[in-house]
Image: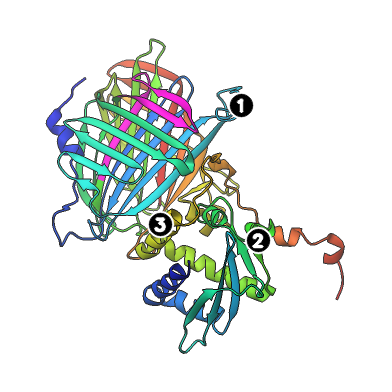
Amino acid sequence: MMDWLHQLVAIIRYNNQFAWQLMKEVTANRHIVIEIDGCRISLTTTGQKDYQLKTKLADAAEQSRFITTGDVLRKIIDGQITLDYAIVTEQIYIRATIQELISIYRLVICLLAEGAVNSKMQLLWKDFNKEWYPAQKKISPLTMQEQKPVHGILISMVPEKTLLVQV
Amino acid sequence: MTKLDHITYLLDELKIPVNDPYCPEDWKDWYHYIFFDPVTQTRLLFNISLSGRPGNGTITVTVFLTVPSGFLHSAISSFDAFETFGFCDTILWSDQVERVPLMINTDHTFFSIDKNKVSIRCNHPASAIRFSVDGFPAATPVYVPELFPFGKGFIGWGLIPGMDMNGKVFLHDKPITISTKWYCYHDHNYGRFNWGEDLGWTWFVISVFDSKGIKTSYVLHQGNNRDLTKTGIPFLFVYEKDMLKKIFMGESVELNWQWNNEPEKPPILPGVMASLFADRHVAVPSGFTVKATDDKDYLYIKMKRESVTEMILPDYDKKQYTFMKEMNGVVEAVQFIQAKKKLFAKGFCYAEFVH
């Protein structure tokens, strides 16, 4: 996983300057522990000018701020669910401010768009799909009509009384 | 029926100059098959598409399987409601393609055309679809090497709107048998252009049977730009019992789309495009009419769209997209050809609107 993350940064750096600037803007000078299928990795980045990603296995004492599974990532790539739906339905657990969430959303959409037209990203994704914990062996296929992204779900979770509060 | 082997070979040979190390990257070549069961209305679309050249090109396999609702999990109560399963996989093109006989062997798919025999094997565990079909051309092949300007390049195609195919499809282990009683359509398209250019086309195949069980099919192709303000010369082929009976073309063909007032959000393939374009509502056709008439003959077709899915095709080089609406619908048709009138109350239509 750590190797894949470094490859992802390298591909973006040399293939899409817009995504690269956005990646630096969103992730520079940060530290986070992510957890995918129980595998906890600590990510630390340096500043925008000499941007570097450092990865190591996370210390037990550090809390994960992003938790999900490989299957959820696959579902997002396969268009079965959207990123925001995965967050709201707790298929992705993330602790961040709303501003950080918006930035992460922009970056993920940018990476998805690049992945659709970049053969190196596709190879990386293929590697992940093959090597990471395989998807459930017996799947129940979804119809394409069930591919219904739900929008506005974040705001619909806020109670009406709260929405009506005058500040 | 008239089967011309040399025409079929010319039609189906791979056009991309794969052995040329300087082969331009905007070459495209794709093989398209549609299988339709007139009894249950079940249909299967298979498309295998090559783009670029070995080393830096791609191979894309697209499958749509539409079955009566309830087929998978419960009993089928009617043949009026349908659900679609499908996938679209793109892989990098390395050494998967043999030119003669044509053979494409990817992770999930084997496709070959050897002395007119077509074989397709597909096993895609992630979408629980697998199938195996074999067969031969039955209808008169028509090769249209138009090579007319298309976008910044050109496009050409050929069609065989009748194939005798046999095989089995499994959706999550539930079998469907494809036999020669099914209607099977095939075309092969090729050319040089980039997806996302100001180009597109309208294409459809219609299969109808008269009261005596005689099969008639109609195939139309017309180029267009993205906003339909410019259209190319339409070709409308009429087949009866797998024989080419009539071609209407040019100004004798009038195609009119009808559009829904409310924009819709059709299901999208590939999946990553569904995630990218998740918040987008688009205008989709509700149907079309076609009127074709010349000094002697007349044809009128009315299609009512039942389902629509969207393919979004990205261009690797230019980073732009072409949008392809794939539609199923029912048709009524009236024809007066060679002094004989025929009415068709209900037929099947598979159409593409590309922009």
Labels 1 and 2 touching (C-beta < 8 A): no
Q: What's the CA distance linking mark 1 and mark 2?
A: 32 Å
- Eye-nearest disc, 3 or 1: 3
Q: What's the CA distance linking mark 3 and mark 1?
A: 34 Å
From the image, tell me which residue sits under label 2: A87
Considering only vertical position in the picture, is B219 above or below B281? above
From the image, tell me which residue sits under label 3: A126
Tell me which residue sits at (18%, 47%) in the image: B15
Residue B151, given in percent of the width and then of the height, sits at 29, 57
Q: What amino acid type is highlighted by mark number 2?
A: Ile
Q: What amino acid type is highlighted by mark number 1?
A: Ser
From the image, tell me which residue sits under label 1: B74
Find residue B209 and name its label: none
Labels 3 and 2 touching (C-beta < 8 A): no
Judge by depth and name the residue closer to the eye, B74 or B324.
B74
- Look at the image and name its color scheme: rainbow
Tell me which residue sits at (36%, 20%) in the image: B179
**Residues rendered magenta in the picture:** B165-189
Quadrant of res B189:
top left
On the same chain, marks 3 and 2? The answer is yes
